[in-house]
Amino acid sequence: MRSLLTGHQIDVCGEAGDGEEAVAKVRKLRPDIVLLDINMPVMNGIQAAYEVRRIAPSTKVIFCTIHDAPETAAILRPLADGFVPKSALGTELIPAVKRLFQTQG
């Protein structure tokens, strides 16, 4: 994902190996957007998204996950500003990120 983002001139300020580390990085780095997977070790992506919303409410959350059923997106909608199935990362991630940057004004 890093190379996909940087290849489109989108700065990546950090990476995390698990949900707990992701929350710690959000606390420290205050990114504009965070990409989370539902299935992450230590703390899953849903728990991490709750924490991100609590500690950095202006940070946008995009879920990137193998769970691409419409029902999954509907369940995640209250926590997520975007949802990209992993099977479509190559075509949908960049447009999703750019949409969020545009809505920030």
Image: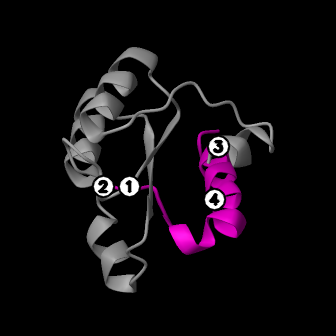
Q: Quadrant of residue 96?
A: bottom right
Mark 2 burial class by Cα count in 10 Å: few <14, some 14-19, many 20+? some
Judged from the image, the secondary structure of the residue bearing numbered disc 2 is loop
Left or right, residue 52 beside residue 32: left
Quadrant of the snapshot with the C terminus: top right
Mark 1 burial class by Cα count in 10 Å: few <14, some 14-19, many 20+? many
- The residue under label 3 is which amino acid type? Phe
For the residues bearing labels 4 and 3, Cβ distance under 8 angstroms: no
**Closer to the camera in the image, 82 or 8:** 8
The picture places residue 92, in percent across and down from the top left corner, at: 65, 66
Front label number (4 vs 1): 1
Q: Which residue is mark 2?
A: 79
The picture places residue 13, in percent across and down from the top left corner, at: 57, 24
Q: Which residue is mark 3?
A: 101
Question: Is residue 90 inside the magenta stretch?
Answer: yes
Q: Earlier in the sequence, mark 4 or mark 2?
A: 2
Kindly report the distance in space between the C-alpha atoms of the residues bearing marks 1 and 3. 20 Å
